[in-house]
Amino acid sequence: MAQKEYDVLVIGAGLIGSSTAMHLASLGAKNIAVVEADMAGRLSSSELNAGGARATWDQSINVQLSRESIKYLKAHQEQVGFRECGYLWMFNQGQWPSALDRVKFLKKEHGIELDVLDVAALKNKCPFIDKTDDLQGATFSPLDGLFNPNLLKNLLRAEAQAKGVTFLEGHRVRHVNRSNASVEVTCELLPPKNESELKDFFESDPTLAVQSKETVLLKGKTIVNCAGPWAGHLAKMIGYESPVWAVRRQVSIFDVRDFDMSEYGMMVDSSGVYFHPEATNILGGYADHSEPRGHNLNYDGQSFFEEKIWMPLFERSTKFEQLKHLTGWGGLYEMTPDKTAILGNVEGMPNVFENHGYSGRGAMQSYAAGRGLAELIQFGKFQTLDLSSMQGSRFNTGKLIPEGLHI
Ligand SMILES: Cc1cc2nc3c(=O)[nH]c(=O)nc-3n(C[C@H](O)[C@H](O)[C@H](O)COP(=O)(O)OP(=O)(O)OC[C@H]3O[C@@H](n4cnc5c(N)ncnc54)[C@H](O)[C@@H]3O)c2cc1C
């Protein structure tokens, strides 16, 4: 079996793994390899998300991670397609008190100002929102926005490569042997562009599959779990349990006759449907909370669009009474029990680190999340943001970080 040796093995080259590797190299770490089954990321969450970025969360740690990352997006807006177009969030009567509490919290704790709109002000700002009987008001966060996660991933990867990081394409991790001094990772070499094999792998548990292909052995000192929705499988291979799970989230692309949404940003309806301009069309998504856990990457097509997207939007605007479904996809959220990510060292395993479980906000937090973990690995402590509360051991101690405002 072929062998290669590195110091740090980062598993997963999505936004989180690419950012972690890039920051590690920036901080002076050497001999880093990022191990990835499919560099194109065809089924990865970093490829299949909605491109929203907001710092308006309920937990300070999530506000900080997003805010720091948005600063980076803004500083590189041309390269990553960032548009500071705001998030407009509509609320019904029952949702309104907690929306106002959030406005106060963000101002008091973080100095973030949100516009509070009554229904008349909402209609004035967005005249196409013309069915408002059930609404109590809306909030608008002007500093949030939209970006192209694919461009961000390419930028992080290019910076990482320029600093000496090696990306190993077509390597799917199948087995890990670990001691406190070293790790040995056996990878199956995946033939490039074999889509059906890829889907098979991404929908099944690789720890159970028979290993029959050409393999390569990667030796290292430290391993970093950045496997996104597959982080639970990888944890098992490394020899620990992580409480994360994957769940399908679907989005549709549709056309609205005689309506140009391009001047608006992300909008979230009180029903939970979110939508924003996507080239000349609209992208709409909905987090169906009855969706069973698992690695289901199928898109339900017209039936999802009609039931979950069109019906609520029909009730919000006469402009949305005639929509044409164009396409869509199913991707995976990587969830934790408190809906905040897991970042830090794995307890009892000094050379194992993890950075995953972003529960629907990993694209917008990836820059600061990668920087934070890289600091911990390289210097043994956080330097910019104190992210120590995000360690996975919080699920044993009960010191949870329950995030609420979740789509
Ligand atoms: C429909 C949808 C909408 C979303 N909208 C937003 C949004 O608007 N804003 C936002 O911030 N976030 C959003 N997200 C969430 C966001 O996309 C994710 O949190 C983020 O991309 C996670 O990045 P990651 O690098 O952890 O995971 P991924 O991008 O999935 O990367 C993990 C990588 O690990 C690799 N891998 C896994 N196992 C192995 C193995 N055994 N061997 C080798 N490689 C392996 C995979 O191939 C994959 O490339 C959305 C997600 C979905 C599905």
Image (cartoon, rainbow, N blue to C red):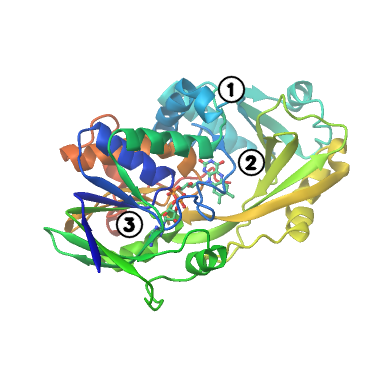
Residue at x 59% of width, y 42% of height = 50
Number of residues whose C-alpha sits closer than 10 Å to that of mark 2, classed few (under 14), some (14–19) or many (20 or more):
some
Q: Which residue is mark 1?
A: 142
The residues tagged by marks 1 and 3 sit, at their Cα atoms, a distance apart of 34 Å
Among numbered discs 2 and 1, the one appearing first in the sequence: 2
The residues tagged by marks 2 and 3 sit, at their Cα atoms, a distance apart of 29 Å
Q: Which mark is residue 373?
A: none
Camera-nearest residue between 176 and 65? 176
Q: Quadrant of residue 72?
A: top left
For residue 108, side relative to residue 88 (left or right) = left
> Secondary structure beneath disc 1?
loop
Image: 382 above or below 234? above
Residue type pointed to by label 1: Pro
Residue at x 39% of width, y 44% of height = 16
Q: Quadrant of residue 248?
A: bottom right
Task: Report the mark closest to the observer, 2 or 3.
Answer: 3
Task: Report the mark closest to the observer, 1 or 3.
Answer: 1
Among numbered discs 2 and 3, the one appearing first in the sequence: 2
The reply to whether discs 1 and 3 touch (Cβ–Cβ < 8 Å) is no
Camera-nearest residue between 252 and 172? 172
Q: Which residue is mark 3?
A: 395
Camera-nearest residue between 389 and 70? 70
> Secondary structure beneath disc 3?
helix
Q: Which residue is mark 2?
A: 95
Residue at x 52% of width, y 68% of height = 197
